Structure formats: C-alpha cells, structure tokens
Amino acid sequence: MRRIKWIRLLTVISTLLLAMSVSAQDKELTLQELIPGGKNYSRFVPKELKQLNWCGERYFYVKGDSVWGAKPERKEQVLFTREQLNQALTQAGLPTVGKLPTFKVPFAQDTHSTVLAFNSHAHQIHFDYQKQKVTADYALKSAWSNLDFCTANQYFAYTNGNNLFLLSPKGDTTIVTNEQEEGIVCGQAVHQREFGITKGTFWSPQGNALAFYRMDERMVTTYPLVNIDSRCATLVPHKYPMAGMKSHEVTVGIYQLATGKTIWLKTGLPKEKYLTNIAWSPDERSIYLIELNREQNEQHLVRYSAETGEREAVLITESDHRYVEPQHPILFLPNDPNKFIWQTEADGYNHLYLFDTDGNELRKLTGGEWVVTRVLGFSEAGDKLIIEGTAPHPVSPSMHSNGLSRYVWAVNLKEQEIMNCLSWKVGVHSWKLSPSGAYALDNVSSSTVPREIDLIQVKEAKVVRTLLTAPDPYKGYRMPKIQTGTLTAADGKTKLNYRLTLPPDLDPNKKYPTIVYVYGGPHAQLVTGDWMHGVRGWDIYMALRGYVLFSVDGRGSANRGHAFESVIHRNLGVNEMADQMQGVAFLKSLPYVDADRIGVHGWSYGGFMTTNLMLTYPDVFKVGVAGGPVIDWSNYEIMYGERYMDRPQDNPEGYKNANLKLKAGNLKGHLLMIHGDVDPVVVWQHSLGFLKACVDANTYPDYFVYPRHQHNVVGKDRPHLHEKITRYFDDYLK
C-alpha cells in the first residue's frame, strides 16, 4: 500500500516537472518585453558590461555599487565604490549620490588619466578615483546647453539661448557672442544636422582658440509647431527651410582666448552653401573645412588661416553627376602634422586616401567593393590606421559579403592598400581603442551569438581575455524562425539581402498573412550580420502571432556603395519600389505565404514607401501602416530633399511622380497613417495634406496622432504604438 502511494506521488511530481518544463519552453513574449520603453524590455536585451570604456590605459565598467577595471595585462579589481565616491563628495562639500552616476571620460586621449566625470545636482564633477578626490567642480545652469569640454585648457563652451559662452575652471564666464536679433544662432549644430554635423563648437588642439558656427535663419520660413500642454495651445515657431526655398546662411568664427577677439572665415559668395566637417591643424594655425554647393554635386576641401580668416588654399575638389555627401573631417597623422587622411566615395565606395597638406594624393589606403564604416584611430606606433568595414571575412569571403558583417582592420600607412584583419570571430565587430592604441575592447555579435566582449591586444590581434559572454535573453521562450538569403534586384543583376521571420510552428501546407517591413531609403540597413540578423522586437511579436515578416534591403539603402544608394536620385520611389516588388514576387513563390493577405509597414522614408506601395499596387497590398510619412517632397527640408531630388523647379517631373497626394484616389485597402503632432523632421503637414487629398478623392484612410511626440514615438508610449499597429493588422489582415 505504501509502495502504491510512493508511485502515485512520483507520478504527480513527474507530471508537474514535465508541465513546468513545457511551460518554460512555451513562455510567451509581450510587447512590454520586446519594444524599447516597455516595462521589461531591459531584461531581453543581450547582457552587457554597463558603461564599459577606457580611462587612461585601464578599462572600467559599473557593477552594482562598484566600478571595476584593470590595466589590460593585470587582474580585474574594484577601482572604487559608491561609498568611496560619496566620501570624496562629502569632503568637497558636495551632495552625495544614491546610485552610481553615468560617467564620462573628460581626458579621453590621456594614457595616464584616472579622472572620471559625472553630472549631479546641476554640477559636473571630476573625480580622480586613484586619489579618491574631487579634482574639479563646474556649476552648470539648467538653461545652458551644447556643453563642449576642452581637455587642454579645461574650459567649457556652452550656449545659453542663441549665444555662445565660456566657463573657466575657476567658474568665470566669458561672453563669446552677443547676438540680439531673433533668428541668429551661435555655437549650435547647423544645416539640419546633415553632413555628419552633430555640434557647433570645435576646440583647437591646445585649447587656445574655439571655432564655432554662426547661423543666420532670419530669411528662412518659420514653420508653426503647436504646444497643447497649456490651457490655450501656444505657438512654437520652428525654422524649417523647405526644398527649393530660401536657405539659412552659415559662417564660421574663431574666438582667440588670449585676445578675446573673434575673426570670421572669409568664405565668400554664394552665401547659400554648406560648411561642414571642420578640423584644426595640429599647430592651430589653420582651419580645414569642406564647402559644398547648394546643388550638393561638388565639394571642396578648403584651408583657411585661423589667425586672419583668409582662404589659403583649395586642396581637393570632387564632383558627381548625382551628389556628393561629405560625412567626415580630415584626420591628421599623429607622427606627421603635414599628412592627413581623406575619406570619400570618389571611386564608388567609401574609402580612405593619404594626402599631404599641399593637397597632393600620396596613396590610396583602402579599396575594393566594400565600404569603410568607422575610423577608430591609430596603432600604438602610429604607423597603422585601425578601421571597421564591410570587407568580406578573409577566411570565407563568400559567406560574409554584401555588407552584412563588420570586421576590424589595420591599414598600413606606408604601403598602398595593405590591410591585416584584426578580428576573426564571424559577425559584427565594434571596437573601442585604448588611448595609446595598444589595446581594444571588442564588442561582437553574430546571428547566433547575442554578445561577446573581448579585450584585444592590437598589435598581434590577440584576445587577452573574454570579459563577457552574454546568454541568450530569449532562452526558454517560444521564438520564431529567422531565415536570410539573397534575391535579385529589379535591374536583373544586383543581389539584395533579405530576412524572413517565420512563426515557430510554421506549417508549409498552410497560408499565412505576411507583412513587408520597409525603410528603403539612404543611411539605413535592415538586414545585418549581428544578433538574429538585426530582427526587430515587433517582427518577433508578430511572427509569434502567426504572421510572416519580411524585409529586403533594396537599392537605395546603405553600406553597398554610391551607385547602389544613389540609384534613387531625382526619382524617389521608383527603383526602391521595384526592388520591394521583387521581394513580393519572392514571397509569392513561397508555399506558405498567402498572396491575398500581404501587408506593408514602415516609418519615415519607410512611411513614404508604405503609402506609395499601397497606392501604386493597390491590388497587391491589402493593409498598410505608414508612420511619419513623407507625402510631398517639396514640403521636406532643403539639405536632404535637394540632395536626392534637386530643387522642385529643376525636377518638376520627379517631384510630381513622388507626390502621393496625386495618388490618393488609388487607395483600395486599409491604410493607417500615424504622425507625431510636433514632428520637426517630417512636419505634420505631410499626412494632413494626404488626408485632405483622400477626402477630395473619396478614399478612406485611417489616422492616429501621438500628441507631444516628434518624429518617432519614444519612451513609455512606444509599446502603445506597436499595440496600435498590431491591432490594425489583426483587424484587417489576419
């Protein structure tokens, strides 16, 4: 009898364990876990070492209430704790912190630095963790922005309103500009942050001078954004130069700290041109910048005197029948101030060239049908340049081409196009070089590896130690199947990368609703060689709900060379859509895709593509969701719009063909359009104008607005956005 009871008990326990095992394997993911801003999202991002960086020749990272780190060849240890930091703050008469703050490295190129910086209670504080002491304290006001710290003189440049100021280490303030008229902006980024521009101030190497932008926007049309937070909504004017209209005028000033005087670069006429990619000469006597004409088809590297503002020389001139797009300032060699590196797409791919300061090309440093994606710095001896790029894997190039992966290379500065691969794990590598260039932190992932972080000795490309191997954050959860491959573009020859995200229990004998997720435009790549091939959380979610998700990087997208990306020039929505339709033809060849239930979704340029596909192929796409869509390119900003379309008066046919208001009558399926009401990038006028065109044409799109959101819905509202999109496809496609 007792034996029977034991058998029954063991049976119950086994059943429970089996149920628990099945349950663990069948756990379901929600939007709160898959979408940024979701309550549990952080748990499902591959584990990383928080704030991993270099301070001097030590790497460091934050773990709990401690900061850990080490010199590369030594054992890791605790560098300091929150308690020790608070003791130093108390000794300096400053408030303590409740948790470890976000640290910056103020002296990033100093190989001996042990100083970290952080912001707390309206102060920026410098803390020497080795001395356990606060070494500097800058009181900052909330109205200040665009802070730019100079390591050489330890001054801050900052803006307050539209003017530029300096803050000394002693707390003294210097007025650099005193513009009184509204519409003149100093010390801020210009040209709508195009051409690689991210800021408006540029310290000289020794900190004796500050170059800065001055932008006159008084002649630019003011676009009305509206703030609904007050009881009576208020107008928020925003300068927005549209394609074909009057542009702003930019000049560059040089403020000399010793004299307190500003000289202006004599950039001359025409005033409507772009001044980009500012760089100082190592001796501080010259300023180098790229001047780009408004048509954006010719660029000049120009040297100016930083002492007089006079134009000294035009060193390099490049032109293209479509467009040129400078993104990177010149980079001087550490051991030779008379040589610099020039980055250009002149041969059709983004590559590097060595020039002297007289403008003579000395040699081509990289070449081939691949692109340099990042310049990381120099080797310890200064004789090699360390870069990341899409060059195929040296062991199995056929497996890792077409721009999917990123490897790190050492480029010999003395011999033409001689490169050595420094990374051997298959996937996408992202390096942080130590200040000396002797070591690197390598963050690598692949389609099957969430994240690995290795400490690398650069000279021998040797892994010193592995700092982290991240587990699969989705382990134990029901997951879709992901497939990648290539298909042929509409030109009949170019290979395109695609990604399929399939339901986990896919039955090839069943028909599934299918959604094409599209971007389709420049500076974007959807299919990659990193974790799960770059799949989005929403793609995973929809595949789990029984949809097939598909993306293809057609011509017009990034990292495949100038001809591949610029094929869209003057005819946006033609070649990109043709390639998307090649993707649709491929989908229809799959036995499990329901050709009568194909939808499309995209944001920004992808919103333009989504709307255009719905209107141009109304019998193919049953449902679409277009977010922040460009509808009429004549209502888009000058820099981007004129680069890819020229001015409306110069390309009327191209603008007409891409004007989706003129196709509003073609709408047959269900189209949901979504927009942020204070979008400063694709202004609200685009989707509102489309709605008006649909009313006039007696077609019936659906519409949803996210109040107080700009071009993207971010933060806690982002899961709401994706729930809204999901419900729309469930209602009309499933």
Image (cartoon, rainbow, N blue to C red):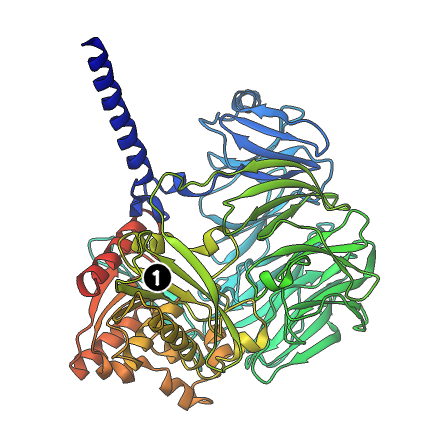
Which residue is labeled 1 in the image? 549
The residue depicted at 64 percent of the width and 34 percent of the height is 115
Q: Specify whether 200 is left or right of 616.
A: right
Q: Is 440 situated left or right of 164 in this image?
A: right
Disc 1 packing (10 Å; few <14; some 14–19; many ≥20): many
Quadrant of the image containing the C terminus: bottom left
Residue 339 seen anywhere in this rendered image of the structure: yes
Picture coordinates of residue 579, whole percent (x, y): 43, 76
Residue 163, given in percent of the width and then of the height, sits at 52, 57
Q: Residue at x 52, y 20 (%)?
A: 83
Task: Work out which residue is located at the far top of the displayed protein and give it.
Answer: 2
In front of the other: 347 or 449? 449
Residue 239, quarter of the rendered image: bottom left
- Front in this rendered view, residue 202 or 349: 349
Q: Secondary structure at mark 1?
A: strand
Total numbered labels placed on residues in the image: 1
Q: Position of residue 626 (x, y in %)?
A: 30, 67
Residue 125 left/right relative to 715: right
Judge by depth and name the residue closer to the eye, 557 or 345. Answer: 557
Q: Amino acid at mark 1?
A: Leu
Q: In the rendered view, would you say 13 is above or below 428?
A: above
Image location of residue 121, percent across then percent down: 46, 34
